[in-house]
Structure formats: structure tokens, C-alpha cells
Amino acid sequence: LAKTTQPISMDSYEGQEVNITCSHNNIATNDYITWYQQFPSQGPRFIIQGYKTKVTNEVASLFIPADRKSSTLSLPRVSLSDTAVYYCLVGDRSGGGADGLTFGKGTHLIIQP
Amino acid sequence: NAGVMQNPRHLVRRRGQEARLRCSPMKGHSHVYWYRQLPEEGLKFMVYLQKENIIDESGMPKERFSAEFPKEGPSILRIQQVVRGDSAAYFCASSPRGGRSNNEQFFGPGTRLTVL
């Protein structure tokens, strides 16, 4: 599985847009990019998934450049409740194999008033 | 539709005792995954099961740990003769489709195991 690198922590303020970038230089052709969010004392929660270009849902946007060696999770107008750890995962959807998800240490996002 | 349920939420055991962690997947999900999270670390995959079958246990420690997902009832992660290093949060996740064919997994609230 492709290894991912993301900042250990980030700080921002309420109402700001937050962008968290993840590097995955060894991403394979079949790999998708998925982001999860984890609040303290809770299990991770799926946020968004994409393969290329841009994906947007009600929670976030995911920007993926043409070479796919990185991706950026964009959270619009964050609030205090967005304080959490955000994990970038890379893996395929070919159906082959049966691995579980591979989580790194994630990015600890702290939102201040 | 209830989410993934895990019990107990907190479990305290003394060294040498057994710990049993239970997970009920979301309704309609037949694929279950167990993960372990140490403090300040990301989740580490342990085992992937379908009903009555272990599909991938590459992340399970070779000794003392076992998992099952019977035809009826919850999935169980069993840790025999616990040691202090087993203290961690154990998360269960389920999905409607298996393995890497679907990266979206639905996680339970976790069981926090403390070994005294």
C-alpha cells in the first residue's frame, strides 16, 4: 500500500477555510484517496473519497492534482467542532485482496475561537 | 439503522486474565474488521472476518489473540492472558462489501481496555 505523509498538527480559527495536504508519492494506478475524521474517544468516520481532480460533498472538498502524488482536504468555514484528527488513506478498490485500512498518525487539527 | 455497536465500552482486567470484546456490525453488513489504537497512534489493522470465516489475520499477534464471527451473534475479539501492553482502544468496523473493494468502513465507538 502507498505510504502517506501529512502534517502532525495544524491550528486555525473558527470561520476559516482549512486545507490539509497529504503526500503519497508511490500511489498506484488502482489506488483511491480516502479521508477519515476521528474525534477523541470515538471511532473514525469516513469523510470523502476521490480518484482524481475534485470531489465535493456536504462536509468537505478533495483536490487531487493530475499526477495524484498528493491530495488536499479542504474544510470550509471550520467550527470548534471540527477539532479532530484527520487521516489520509490510500488503497485500491479492485476487489483483490482483503486488507484492512492502513492509518498513519494523521493530522491533529485544532480550531480556536 | 443502528450503527456499529461495541461492548463493553470500557474493560479493566488484571494481568493474566482474559478479555472478550464484542462487536455487532451495522444491519446488512457481513464484513467485520478489528483495529487496535495505542495512545497517540493511528489505528492498526488486526483482522478481517466474514460470517464464520477469517479472511485476513495478518495484523493479529501470533499468540493470545483470536477472533471469530459466528453465524449468529456478534463478532468477538478474545485476548487471553492479558499483559499491560495490551492496554489500548480496540475498534470494530463493518462494511457491506469486503476488503479493498470498498474503502468506506463504518466504525464503532471502541472498547478501551486497561490492563492493571
Image (cartoon, rainbow, N blue to C red):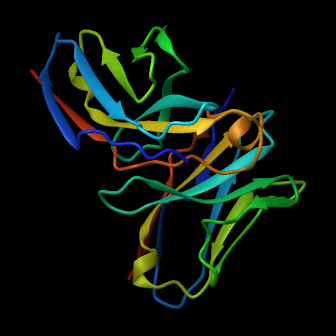
Give the farthest residue toward the front: A67
Question: Which is nearer the eye, A10 or B3?
Answer: A10
Name which quarter of the figure residue A75 lies in.
Answer: top left
Report the number of discs. Answer: 0
Give the farthest residue toward the left: A113
Question: Which is nearer the eye, A9 or A80?
Answer: A9
Residue for point 76% across, 41% down: B98
Where does the image place residue A15, in percent across and percent down from the top left? 17, 10
Where does the image place residue B46, in percent across and percent down from the top left? 60, 62
Name which quarter of the figure residue B96 lies in.
Answer: top right
Task: Indicate left or right for A35 with A18 as reference.
Answer: right
Query: Could you tell me which quadrant the N terminus of chain B lies in?
Result: top right
Residue for point 70% across, 65% down: B57
Where is A28 relative to A60, above or below?
Answer: below
Where is A29 relative to A9, above or below?
Answer: above
Residue B26 seen in the current view: no
Where does the image place residue A86, in percent across and percent down from the top left? 35, 35
Question: Which is nearer the eye, A53 or B45?
Answer: A53
Query: Could you tell me which quadrant the C terminus of chain B lies in?
Result: bottom left
Residue for point 40% across, 42% down: A4
Residue B63 seen in the current view: yes
Where does the image place residue A39, in percent across and percent down from the top left? 35, 38
Where is A47 relative to B63, above or below?
Answer: above
Residue for point 42% across, 36% down: A88
Task: Indicate left or right for B2 with A107 as reference.
Answer: right
